[in-house]
Amino acid sequence: MSRTPGPGLADQPVSSLKGVGPGLRDRLAKLGIASVQDLLFHLPLRYQDRTRITPIGRVRPGQDVMVEGELLSAEVEFGRRRSLLCRLRDDSGMIGLRFYYFSAAQRKRLQPGTRLRCYGEVRPGKTGPEIYHPEYRDTAEQPPVEDHLTPIYPATEGLQQTRLRALMEQALERLDSGNTLQEWLPELFRPPGLPVSLAEAVQYVHRPPVDARIELLELGEHPSQQRLAFEELLAHRLSMRRIREQARQFSAPALPATGTLTRQLLNSLPFPLTGAQQRVLRDISTDLSEPVPGLRLLQGDVGSGKTVVAALAALQAAENDHQAVIMAPTELLAEQHFITFSEWLAPLGIHVGWLSGRVKGRRRDEQLALISSGTARVVVGTHALFQDEVHFHRLGLVIIDEQHRFGVHQRLALREKGAGPDGSSKTLPHQLVMTATPIPRTLAMSAYADLEVSVIDELPPGRTPVNTVVISSDRRDQVIERIREACRNGSQVYWVCTLIEESEALQCQAAEATAALLAEQLPELRIGLVHGRMKAADKTSVMDHFKQGAFQLLVATTVIEVGVDVPNASVMIIENPERLGLAQLHQLRGRVGRGSRASHCLLLYQTPLSRAGRERLMIMRDSNDGFHIAEQDLRLRGPGQVLGTRQTGLMDFRVADLQRDQALLSLTLPVADRLLKEYPEHVTPLIQRWLGERELYGNV
């Protein structure tokens, strides 16, 4: 007998579930859960197998197991840390249960003779296998073994797994009892091999049966997961398509290439453009000539020459009596751009404006006036450019350097500067976003489906590959000697200090201490120091002195990651490189090898090195190819961290994986076309289901 569909789960607030009061509702909201449907699409990260009891004699270190037996003892042990150690025995053997955090009441309950069922990870102990802080229950409570694998969900502070699972059971019961989970993807549109319905897929991933292949689920390759992954990727593609369509509803100033200024700059440069630079310039010039907003992502490895491309693009806007703005993520990089742009453009009669958080008082007022009047036809700065009191005269082009370093709200705010003070104008500036962190093709396809992509895939003549050496800090004395020899031969050296703490103050202290220590060990060298807490003028002065050769060794924090160009610097030591991601290591390494000297990068790691840390450093040792490194960075860290969008959730997929699901990603293109054409009313609810409020964040 057919069942009459119940009310849609998307319309049922999560507060309608039993036990969800205002406090729990607010905690769920932090996870993006507002409705019962949202809860059902809060998908497991992994699974635990609590469907069977493992004999204690068969457990092995590293396993997550359920064991059951009789408590023989429960005693407090005193060592480096006080702990409660219990001994649990069954017919096959004995195992320790160790608690470092325990109460008197807990100790009292754990009496010898009590029968317990426990779950946890087995670790090697002093006297045999142990489980640290197991979950346990007294078997007198008759706890049944689970009849399905136990899901582990993304959580937040104050929201435990047991509470999440209880809420999920309520949501699944509603789904079982006829409440509808709307199918927005017609059956004919589903890829071959993914026949399961949406409701079946959701049920399966939350309640995998006892015989489920857990290894397939852990890999995300079960058909139910793939069914959901396809729909999630489709929702992202539809969202990007919508953003592109929305952008086309706006006009942009048509800025055709006249060549009056760009030709002058090209003739004044001491170097010719590479073929790749010329190719991407043609792409950008075509964008600027159109009366619709150009949206282009410019990728280029470290040292490929993106800055001159940006300057020529800015000049095309200036030729058409419009302003161009260049925003950089750090004061140091913005200052370098300002100096470079001023050297190139001032002789052409172009006034270059400058605005950062450190420009204050009368000087700030002067810069704001130059920007609002249009006198400053090219403006360089930091995030200070998108503050409310900054008004442009005729903004035609926005250039964002190292785009992944900005939050999406910042990028969006700057783009909207071209829509007038009140945002009412239907005119937007053209937008060029640049990155020296090559973004893997699969990631660019999904994250930047609304942008055209150009790649500078050729380095200028004279750039030398950097030889990378991975070396233990135990051999620090040898590294010191290598620095002495390099400086004796006329080279200059970077020493980069990193700290795991996200504290600029601590990083600066570490850099200062390192500089003092190196000064003792290398008294014959002139040593400079630069870090993020120095005044802008002081940082610029130190960098200028280093560039001019006044300092032989520069001790720095990762503030030098981007934009610093000292051709004579041929050796870099990166201390504690295991604490950095591959992309940042590659950026830092790009500060050397910019001249004709053979260049070296020494990765000075602390022992012991984790397996993941070793893998990252070996990748750096073996490759200078930014695109290969970017692919490996994506594999190791995931798309959210590679793009810097973890804080927005833009690329924080629930079930899809851009590396694993490349085949599914390509299949979403024809399905998106058909859905938009044949079922346009399905598009908005499908996007809302998977992205919710995050859709806005793609519009940058």
Image: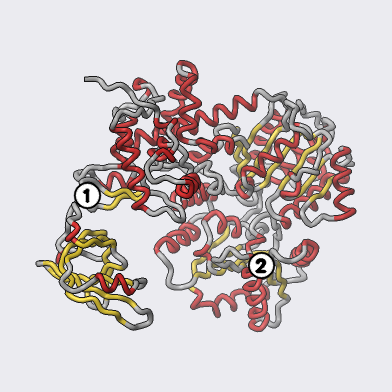
Q: Amino acid at mark 1?
A: Glu
Residue at 72 percent across and 72 percent down: it is 528
The x and y percentages for residue 342 are 83, 49
Q: Which of the 4 image quarters holds residue 222?
A: top left
Q: Badge 2 local density, few (<14 within 10 Å), some, or many (20+)?
A: many
The numbered mark at residue 556 is 2
- On the image, the x and y values in percent for residue 413 come to 69, 40
Of discs 1 and 2, which sits in the foreground?
Answer: 1
**Which sits earlier in the primary sequence, circle 1 or circle 2?**
1
Q: Residue at x 25, y 62 (%)?
A: 136
Q: Quadrant of the C terminus?
A: top right
The kind of residue tagged 2 is Ala
Dot 1, crowdedness within 10 Å: few (<14), some or many (≥20)?
few
Looking at this view, is 690 or 215 the one in front?
690
Secondary element at image label 1 = loop
The CA span between labels 1 and 2 is 55 Å
Q: Classify residue 552 as left or right of residue 614.
A: right
Place residue 522 in its image quadrant: bottom right
Picture quarter with the N terminus? top left
What secondary structure is marked by label 2? strand
Q: Give x and y (percent) for residue 378.
A: 81, 42
Give left or right: position of 278 versus 32: right
> What is the basis of the colouring in this image?
secondary structure
Task: State the residue in front, 611 or 53.
Answer: 53
Residue under label 1 = 146
Question: Is the residue 699 above or below the residue 50 in the image?
Answer: above
The answer, for residue 109, to whether it is visible in the render is: yes
Compared to residue 119, the image places residue 202 above or below, namely above
Q: Can residue 193 be seen by looking at this rendering? A: no
Percent position of residue 13, x then y: 45, 36
In the image, which disc is placed on residue 237?
A: none
